[in-house]
Structure formats: structure tokens, C-alpha cells
Image: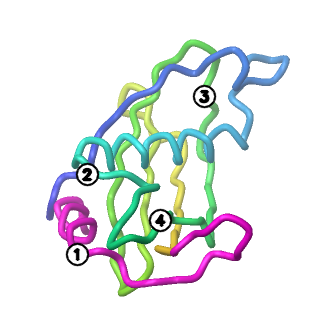
Amino acid sequence: MPEPFQTSRLVEFHDTDMAGIMHFASFFIYMESAEHELYRSLGLSLHEEVDGELISFPRVAAACDYSSPARCEEILDIAISVTRIGAKSISYEFRFTRAGVLLAIGKMTCVCCRVAHGQPPVSRPIPDNIAEGLRVYAM
């Protein structure tokens, strides 16, 4: 089984509540940030021109199950696996740990879309170079 993409992030003060515990919604921000890091590590972008069309990857589903709190100034390790590459969609799993302790598991599904100013996104096939790059982390 391929190894997941690994990154880490410091829990900052603005990501926490008054008790210094990371707010549940911050996990979703961290998932998106980690996804961007994954794409950049592959020399790709989540928002780029392909074949004369601007494409992006709007989120169509996101969830997170929490096991243990994260606190201000802790460093979280985030492991990203690609759980599915479809014709037009990509699904991910994000495992948040601190010093080997599982804190949360997030899931997210995105759809490759053609985007144009003032128009709704229209799904389109995932470009081959993006699908091929992500297969390195596919479960």
C-alpha cells in the first residue's frame, strides 16, 4: 500500500476556543491547506488553466470524526491518502495525529470543474496529469 502524503501544522491561537482547544471547524481549514500542499508537492495547482479552460475543485462533501482534542501551539501531523480517483471526482482521507496519537479523521470529496466568472461550475474529466500525480498516494 502506498505511503500517504505527510505534512504538519502548528495549531495557532486563532484556531482555538477560549480554553485553547482547536475549534472543530479549523480541522476543515487544515484539510484544505494540506490538500494544497499535496498538489504543490506534485507541481500541480487546484486552480489552473487546462486546455484553455480555468479548472478548480469545488468540495461536494466533507466530514471529520474527532477522537481527542488538539491544543494551541501543538504541532499536528497530517497524513493524506487518496481514497478514490473517479472520472470527475477525487476523495481524500486526512489522519490528524500528535506524537502518534490519533486526534481526528477527515474525509473530503472534490469535483473537477470548469469555472468561469459569473457562471456556475460545470464538472469535467480530471486532467490526466493530475490523476496520474495523485495515484502516488492512492489507497
Of mark 3 and mark 4, the one earlier in the sequence is 4
Question: Label 3: which residue?
Answer: 70
Give the amino acid type for the residue marked by disc 3 in the picture. Ala
Find out whether residue 95 is within the magenta segment.
Answer: no
Residue at 55% x, 39% y is 30
Q: Residue 109 in the image: state x and y as whole percent.
A: 52, 70
Give the amino acid type for the residue marked by disc 4 in the picture. Leu
Choose between 39 and 113: the one closer to the eye: 113
Find out whether residue 118 is within the magenta segment.
Answer: yes
- Would residue 59 be found to the left or right of residue 101 on screen? right
Choose between 106 and 34: the one closer to the eye: 34
Question: Label 2: which residue?
Answer: 4
Question: Label 4: which residue?
Answer: 54
Of mark 3 and mark 2, the one earlier in the sequence is 2
Of mark 4 and mark 2, the one earlier in the sequence is 2
- Would residue 93 be found to the left or right of residue 130 on screen? right
Q: Which residues are magenta?
A: 114-139
Residue at 42% x, 83% y is 88
Residue placed farthest to the front in the image? 52
* SS for dot 4: strand
Distance from label 3 to label 4 (Cα)?
37 Å
Q: On the rendered image, what quadrant is the N terminus found in?
A: bottom left
Question: Label 1: which residue?
Answer: 128
Of mark 1 and mark 2, the one earlier in the sequence is 2
Q: Residues within 10 Å of mark 3 (few under 14, many from 20)?
A: many
| Of labels 1 and 3, the one closer to you | 1
Q: Residues within 10 Å of mark 4 (few under 14, many from 20)?
A: some
